Structures are given as C-alpha cells and as structure tokens.
Image (cartoon, rainbow, N blue to C red):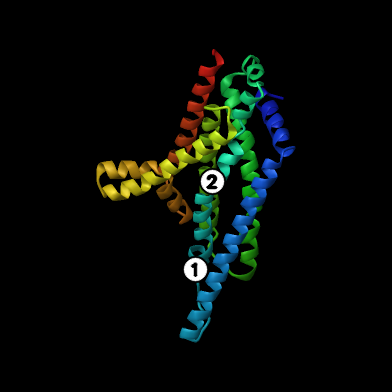
Amino acid sequence: MTPVQAIIAKELRSYFVSPIVYAVGAVFLLIFGVLSYVFVVNAGNQAVRLMQVQGAAAQLNLNDLVLRPTFSFMAIFLMLLLPILTMRTFAEERKLRTVELLMTSPIGINEIVVAKFLSVYLIFLGLLTLTGIAPLILSLFSSFDWNPVFTGYLALALLGAMFLATGVLASALTENQIVAAFLSFGLLILVWLLGGLGNVLGDTSIGNTIAYLSFIEHFDRLTRGLVDTKDLVYYLSSMVLMLFLAHRVVESQRWK
C-alpha cells in the first residue's frame, strides 16, 4: 500500500466513525431529493396548464425545467455543505497535536495534501453517485436528453473538487474547525460574487476576466450540455492552485 493509499484509508475510517459524513450525506441527499421533487411538481403543473390551453398533451423540456435548476441550486448549496466536510482535514490534526507525527514521517507533504483531498473527494463522489437515482426514476415516466445530465454531473464533480480543495486550504490555515469552515465558505462566496462584479463591469476586458474567475459561467455551460476546454481548464487549474497553496501552508508550518 502506497503512503497516499494508507492516509486515504486512515482518513476514511476516521470519517465513517464520526457523525460528520452521515449528517452531511443525509442533508445532501435530502436537499437533492427535495429540489428534484419540487421541480418535477412544477413541471407537472406547467404541463397541466399547457394541456388546458392547447387541448393536447404538452411536450416539456425536462432538462430545462427539472434537471438544470436542480444542478444550479445544488451548486450554491455545496458552498455551505462541503466546508463542513473539509474543516477537519488539517485543523483536527493540529488540535490533537498529531500533525507533528505526520510532518516528521517519511511521507512527503504533497502526498499528505493529495491524500487528504482525495479522501473527502471520494466521499463526495459517493454521495453524488447516489443522487443518480433521481434522473433514473424520472426516465421511467418521461424522456429527456441524457447528454446535459451527464455534463451536469461532470459540472458538479468538478465544482466539488474545486470547493473541497479550497476547504483543504482553509483547514490548513487554522486549528479551529469552525474557523476553517467559515474561512472556506467566505473564499467560495468571494469567488461566486466575482461573476456579479464581472457583469457590472460589462463586456470589457476587465469585466470578462473577472467573470471568468467565477465558477458560475463555467458551471452553467456544462449543465447546458456544452463541454468547453476552457471550462475544464478553469476547474482543474483552480483545484491545483488551491492544493498547491495548501501544500505551501503546510510546508511553512513544518519548520515552526
């Protein structure tokens, strides 16, 4: 077993013996289920109204009425939820004074940071996979285009990776888990608001640059079924940058 695999196994064991994963998972699945139900009911009401007007069965786009809105609301909700999942990655190690043992071990800092990130990312991907039940059930009663569904899940997976990497960085900055959660949430809110600032500045070079830094525009394109290289590069580069900064923070604390 490689050092990364050993740390991932240790982290997963510590997560599943605590109530954090179960609480986060229950809330995540509940919110996804409630959102899906609300938008399905709304689509059904629209179909009834159109049928009364047109006198025939209405053809509705479930991608636009149900799936895309669900993905969009989940993107905002993840800003609140994922910092709770990452707040303990390094903060708890420092609080319990076990970080000294970790730092003096023959394991490289890059391996530690990557393993900490992958452990929470695997949990997130597991929860995301469980939500696939919703579109599968919906497909039994109506037909829709699966391509935006796949790209929508890709968008959530990439967005989750970016959010979790930011949370790992925040946790590396403090030994207080609550502070780490709020710091991560604040950083993500700031990135989100960059999209609004870019819209205020309009179609200018500065406005477009600032808008590019926000995850909203990239996320929306993916949920529409449009896979653009610049969107993939944005999420992957953001994730790598956050993990690199976390690496630098941990390394700077190693010699204190």
Looking at the rendered structure, the kind of residue marked 2 is Leu
Q: Is residue 235 left or right of residue 6?
A: left
* Tag 1 secondary structure: loop
| Furthest-left residue in this view | 204
At horizontal 44% and vertical 43% (from top left) the residue drawn is 189
Query: In terms of secondary structure, where does tag 2 sit?
Result: helix
When the figure is inspected, residue 230 is found, relative to residue 5, above or below; the finding is below
Do the residues bearing badges 1 and 2 touch, measured as CB atoms within 8 Å? Answer: no
- Report the label total: 2
Counting from the top left corner in percent of width and height, residue 38 is at 57, 66
Counting residues from the start of the chain, the first of labels 1 and 2 encountered is 1
Q: Which mark is residue 80?
A: 2
Quarter of the image with the C terminus is top right
Q: Quadrant of residue 146?
A: bottom right
- For disc 1, the marked residue is 61
Res. 229 in view: no
User: Mark 1: which amino acid?
Assistant: Asn
The residue nearer to you, when weighing 235 against 15, is: 15
Q: Quadrant of the N terminus?
A: top right
Identify which residue is drawn at 40% across, 42% down.
Answer: 230
Give me the disc on residue 93.
none
Q: Is residue 212 left or right of residue 167?
A: left
Q: Position of residue 193 (x, y in %)?
A: 39, 46
Q: Position of residue 164 (x, y in %)?
A: 55, 38
Residue closest to the eye, 44 or 97: 97
